[in-house]
Image: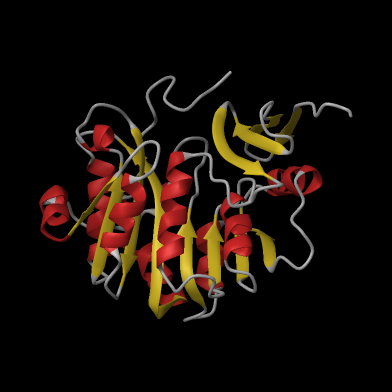
């Protein structure tokens, strides 16, 4: 059998590489400009390699009863890890994936195609522009995992953006986002303040070492107009190889402190990761 070989392409926003995992027969790591973006095992779509992806997966598992199909909007495509996960765990779901980098989409579909009948529709477009044209009340879940290089773009951090997300979600819908920051957490605190201005419930999931300011890392923000199953999320994240904490209610309000919602005119991208935080190779 021919061994899979790495694939490198110049895409719209950098240099993308697909690298095979020597330990798993049809598993691949996607990087863009050296920063890991996605990990996909074509034979095991429920395998979530990255810690932040597992935490997003835990939220997806708890937003509705097991196996119930959902309408999911993904802002940011990568190698389509989470759309594949939802298609496997919630068959019959309808999913839209919005990815600004058309070249990246073509690379992923060419080498890591999604199965026929997966219910995954792909759109090459800017995330906020697409969101602003999406029908109101059309999604059960909105997953935001958009990085320009290693930073969340500024136009996806504002109150106006959050209002569009709220509009597109159904009343019992759930918003979740992959973010990255480090102490003193000015960016993440501002994001929590932004979504708390519109949504009744907010939750933060992060590794304790990140929350204690020991290192730069990913955090997951969750927002909804209904109670979130924080007890189940606490159990699931505590059982991971790298356990995480689930912050909500009074503890989260204390963490947010005096942070204010972000206006479009004040928006900035998330902070640049310190050298070596995410890069490989």
What residue lies at 37% left-to-right and 23% top-to-bottom? Answer: 274
Residue 122 rendering spot, x and y as whole percentages: 68, 61
Q: Is residue 45 above or below residue 30?
A: below
Q: How many marks?
A: 0
Kindly indicate the quadrant of the structure image that contains residue 17. Answer: top right
Q: Is residue 135 above or below residue 250?
A: below
Residue 8 rendering spot, x and y as whole percentages: 74, 29
Kindly indicate the quadrant of the structure image that contains residue 270. Answer: top left
What residue lies at 36% left-to-right and 70% top-to-bottom? Answer: 163
What residue lies at 33% left-to-right and 40% top-to-bottom? Answer: 243
Where is the C terminus found, in terms of image quarters? top right
Residue 194 rendering spot, x and y as whole percentages: 27, 59
Q: Is residue 144 left or right of residue 184?
A: right
Residue 125 rendering spot, x and y as whole percentages: 63, 58
Q: How is the image coloured?
A: secondary structure
Q: Is residue 186 visible?
A: yes
What residue lies at 63% left-to-right and 34% top-to-bottom? Answer: 29
Q: Is residue 22 left or right of residue 3?
A: left
Extreme right residue here? Answer: 1
Q: Is residue 241 left or right of residue 70?
A: left
Where is the N terminus found, in terms of image quarters? top right
Kindly indicate the quadrant of the structure image that contains residue 260. Answer: bottom left
Q: Nearer the viewer, residue 28 or 192?
A: 28
Q: Is residue 156 visible?
A: no
């Amino acid at each position: 059998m021919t061994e899979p070989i790495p694939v490198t392409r110049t895409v719209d926003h950098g240099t993308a590489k697909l690298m095979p995992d020597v330990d798993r027969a049809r598993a691949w790591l996607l990087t863009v400009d050296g920063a890991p973006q996605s990990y996909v095992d074509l034979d095991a779509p429920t395998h979530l390699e990255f810690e932040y992806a597992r935490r997003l997966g835990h939220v997806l598992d708890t937003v509705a009863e097991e196996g119930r199909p959902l309408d999911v909007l993904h802002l940011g495509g990568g190698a389509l890890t989470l759309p594949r996960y939802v298609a496997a765990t919630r068959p019959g779901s309808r999913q839209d994936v919005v990815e600004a980098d058309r070249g990246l989409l073509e690379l992923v579909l060419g080498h890591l195609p999604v199965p026929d009948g997966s219910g995954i529709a792909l759109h090459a477009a800017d995330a906020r522009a697409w969101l602003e044209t999406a029908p109101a009340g059309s999604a059960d879940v909105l997953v935001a995992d958009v990085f320009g290089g290693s930073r969340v773009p500024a136009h996806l951090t504002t109150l106006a953006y959050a209002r569009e997300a709220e509009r597109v979600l159904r009343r019992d819908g759930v918003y979740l986002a992959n973010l990255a920051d480090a102490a003193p957490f000015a960016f993440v605190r501002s994001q929590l303040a932004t979504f708390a201005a519109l949504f009744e419930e907010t939750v933060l999931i992060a590794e304790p070492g990140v929350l204690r300011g020991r290192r730069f890392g990913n955090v997951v923000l969750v927002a909804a107009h209904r109670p979130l199953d924080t007890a189940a999320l606490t159990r699931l994240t505590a059982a991971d190889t790298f356990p995480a904490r689930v912050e909500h209610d009074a503890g989260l309000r204390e963490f947010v402190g005096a942070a204010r919602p972000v206006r479009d005119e004040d928006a900035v991208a998330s902070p640049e990761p310190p050298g070596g935080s995410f890069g490989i190779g």
